[in-house]
Amino acid sequence: MTERIVVGFDASAAARRAVDHALASAKGAGAQIVLAHVLEWSPYSFLTKEEVEERHARRTEELERANAAIMAPLVAELAAAGITVETEIRYGHVADTLIAIANEHKAGSIVAGRTGGAGLAARLFGSVAGTLAQVSPVPVTIVP
Amino acid sequence: MTRVYTFLAALIAAIAAPAIGMAQGIDAKVNEIFANSTGWFVNFIFAPIPGTDFAWIVAWLVIGATVFSLYFGFIQFRVWRHSLHLVAGKYSDPKDAGEVSHFQALATALSGTVGLGNIAGVAVAVSIGGAGATFWMILAGLLGMASKFTECTLGVKYRNEYADGTVSGGPMYYITKGFAERGLPGGKILAVLFAIFCVLGALGGGNMFQANQAHSQIAGVVGDYPGWITGLVFASVVFAVIVGGIKSIAKVTEKVVPFMGVLYVGVALIILLMNIDQIGWAFGQIFNGAFTGNGIVGGMVGALIQGFRRAAFSNEAGVGSAAIAHSAVRTKEPITEGFVSLLEPFIDTVVICTMTALVIIITGQLMTDPQTGLYIIGENGRVVTASGASGVGLTSAAFGSTLSWFPYILVIAVVLFAFSTMISWSYYGLKAWTYMFGEGKKQELTFKVIFCVFVVIGAAASLDPVIDFSDAAIFAMAVVNIFALYLLMPIVKRELESYLKRLQSGEIKRFK
């Protein structure tokens, strides 16, 4: 079975560097890439009546936009580089969802960028990279 | 820009008006016209069953809730564990993440019902019906869980889904579609009747009662001033939100209200813990009063009527409004929305209302004759209270007697609760209005303007005619809704049996 690498991608510059890093290792190892985009979402937030009513339409819109604007161009680029790419667009807590995706795809590693936040907010609430490093069941590469 | 001017005008009026002598006259006039023009409707809804002094509408609600409880084999006690699992997301497919969760549906519906009914309504109940009213209120809450289960399941099952992904639902829709499906006549007429009462309920309990009690609470803290001034200020803000589409105000409110609710319950708990030695005595008062009345006007029946009235007003079970709120939620199984919704009367009435009642009883607000142990009844037929206050003022005095600063917090809570309930009911009323007159900008604007006018009337009129009309309108919704639920409950039973079977066989998967 070919090895799979999960890459978290959110269209940021750091995420782009993570993709480049994953691309290089995938080429070297002949691995496949699972491109994952997670929309931050908590099922326990409070919504107004109108937000409840419009939620389904919003979600459909958000998924389409994420696919068209963020994922599609990158998939085309990676495919052109000769890499087999799968995509996952999901809602949830970013680090938890990336780990869930890695488990489902039986991936050998996760690659993610980091925003470089080391301030109070990051200490209090934790960062995606930090959480991944702490709880991931597979090796994690954090790309600066 | 006009919005800003209206608001400024209202603000200037608020500052300048106490000086105007005729200001009080406006309130009296509004009150007189309102009481005269709604009296017949109120009298009809609260007419006693011939030969008794028992209002037929209360019997109607009790019988309805009892029938649903029996018909579904006391569903409220059988599935609550599964309901909690649903709310916790244990049965949510991770692939559906990003849709409205069961927790969010419950929280949104609760923020529409938890409000003044829990603070002011309970105070009204115990000041008329004594501590014993609390017992009947709790019983009504427990039975009401079955009514809510029935209506919310139907609300989701028969909603209208539009091409743009939005949905409209509620009794209007399940009455028309459900009746057609069962081959019953008169669905359309009944649905329109419900819609009319829903508009009245939105203007009454969902609007005037809220404005009225918010004003009374503000006046209690800053000193008395004419109600129409509060009304104008409130109306301007409501207008800005529902007509001006300033969603940020509604958003902020929806997000602050849950915390206010938690704060209220938290403070009530602290007061109860401070008086933990008296809780046994308070429950004694509640049980004793429930069957004897302890000297209140109307005795046991009087206590029962007040308990059931205020419970229905607070948790809205059987009224049909929750069915409108829940129908917007996406789920493959309509019945799961019913399971989740049956938690609402429990949280709203059995937990929060009971806490308010306990605080009022324990802090000794209801005056009793030391010799006989019976309540002292004032000239208006109500129990004399320590502070002389009724409605929200009584709750405020009860909390204030232990924590002197709490009335100030309560003002903020009451204003926010009142505001969020108004916004919720403007949504219910609007759904009923557009069901009757069609979707469209002009129709919507007409309703919204009427809604704002009633804010002013509600704040200006005195409590009694307002509370009578508010109850009457909301109960009129329940008359139509419960009648329809009787005819449609076999559909819910089919859904229930199929779901429980699949749950047992493991076809309904648990994800966590």
Image (tube, coloured by chain):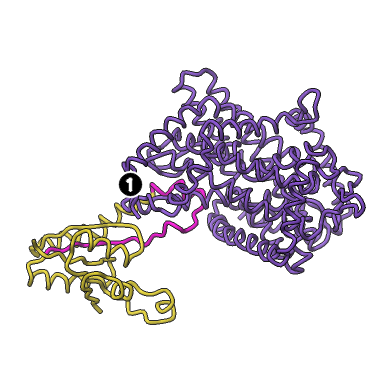
Chain colours: A yellow, B purple
Q: Which residue is mark 1?
A: B509
Q: Nearer the viewer, residue B221 or B48?
A: B48
Q: How many numbered discs?
A: 1
Q: Which residue corresponds to the image point at 71% horizontal and 46% vertical from the top-left?
A: B209
Left or right placement of residue B39 versus residue B62 in this view: right
Q: Chain of mark 1?
A: B
In this picture, is B82 found above or below B197? below
Based on the displayed image, in which of its 4 quarters is residue B387 positioned?
Answer: bottom right
Left or right placement of residue B403 versus residue A18 in this view: right
Left or right placement of residue A129 versus residue B499 in this view: left
Amino acid type indicated by mark 1: Lys
Q: Tell me if residue B283 can be seen.
A: yes
* Residue B324, image x, y percentages: 53, 39
Q: Which residue corresponds to the image point at 77% horizontal and 54% vertical from the top-left?
A: B216
Q: Tell me if residue B235 can be seen.
A: no
Other residues around mark 1 within 10 Å, as few (<14) / some (14–19) / many (≥20): some
Left or right placement of residue B160 versus residue B110 in this view: left
Q: Which residue corresponds to the image point at 50% horizontal and 31% vertical from the top-left?
A: B173
Q: Which residue corresponds to the image point at 70% horizontal and 55% vertical from the top-left?
A: B356
Please report the bounds of the magenta region as a residue range: A32-57
Q: Nearer the viewer, residue B313 or B246?
A: B313
